[in-house]
Image (tube, rainbow, N blue to C red):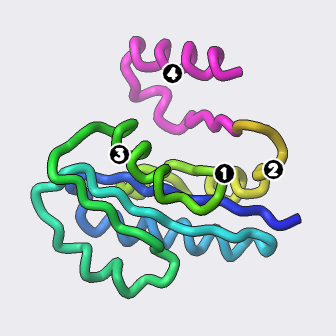
């Protein structure tokens, strides 16, 4: 059975990191041979849109959504969900914060359960205690 996933890249004023994020997703997808994927980019009310012309040349980018006003991360993701072709959805921030390995790990788990929850640990030391606590509570509620 093929793995199918819609990758939603949400961003606001990230500049060239958006292209790097798309390249990271594309490179990771190449490492999962039975993966079918699409990329939907949502610009959450950026003040500039210079990257849009570069995105039109990338065949893996199915849709580009420009929101006139920022509606926040969850709002941007929900706007993109309306356009997703696949049932499995992976939201990815557009400022290139995840390595290919993280995308590969999630992609390999497609169809293994109803939800896959990843936990970042590389920034744990730098995060304020209240954010650490909030993340742990959210993770535990999902579990």
**What is the spatial separation of the Cα atoms under label 4 and label 3, in whole angstroms?**
20 Å
Residue 104 lies, in percent from the top left, at: 69, 59
Residue with the mark numbered 2: 111
Above or below, 123 against 76 in this view is: above
Front tag of 4 and 2 = 2
Do residues under tags 1 and 2 come within 8 Å of each other at their CB atoms? yes
- Disc 4 to disc 1, C-alpha distance: 22 Å
What's the mark number on residue 76? 3
Q: Where in the figure is residue 130, as x and y percent of width and height?
A: 40, 12
Local crowd at mark 1 within 10 Å, few (<14), some, or many (≥20)?
Answer: some
Q: Quick check: marks 4 and 3 in contact, CB under 8 Å?
A: no
Give the residue number, with chain letter if any, for mark 4.
135
Q: Secondary structure at mark 4?
A: helix
Chain-order first, disc 4 or disc 1: 1
Residue 140 on the magenta segment: yes
Say which residue appears at 39% left-offset and 36% top-offset: 74
Q: CA distance from mark 4 to mark 2?
A: 25 Å
- Please report the bounds of the magenta region as a residue range: 116-143
Q: Residue furthest right?
A: 1
Looking at the image, the residue that sits furthest to the front is 82
The residue where tag 1 is placed is: 88
Residue 88 lies in the magenta stretch: no
84 shown above or below 122? below
């Amino acid at each position: 059975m093929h793995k199918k996933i819609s990758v939603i890249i949400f961003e606001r004023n990230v500049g060239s990191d958006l292209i790097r994020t798309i390249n990271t997703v594309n490179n990771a997808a190449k490492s999962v041979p039975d993966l079918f994927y699409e990329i939907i980019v949502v610009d959450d009310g950026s003040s500039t849109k210079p990257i849009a012309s570069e995105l039109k040349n990338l065949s893996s980018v199915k849709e580009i959504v420009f929101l006139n006003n920022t509606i926040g991360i969850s709002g941007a993701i929900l706007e993109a969900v309306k356009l997703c072709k696949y049932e499995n959805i992976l939201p990815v921030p557009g400022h290139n914060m995840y390595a290919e390995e993280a995308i590969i790990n999630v992609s390999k788990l497609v169809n293994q359960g109803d939800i896959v929850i990843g936990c970042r640990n590389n920034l744990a030391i730098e995060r304020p205690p209240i954010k650490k606590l909030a993340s742990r509570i959210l993770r535990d509620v999902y579990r």
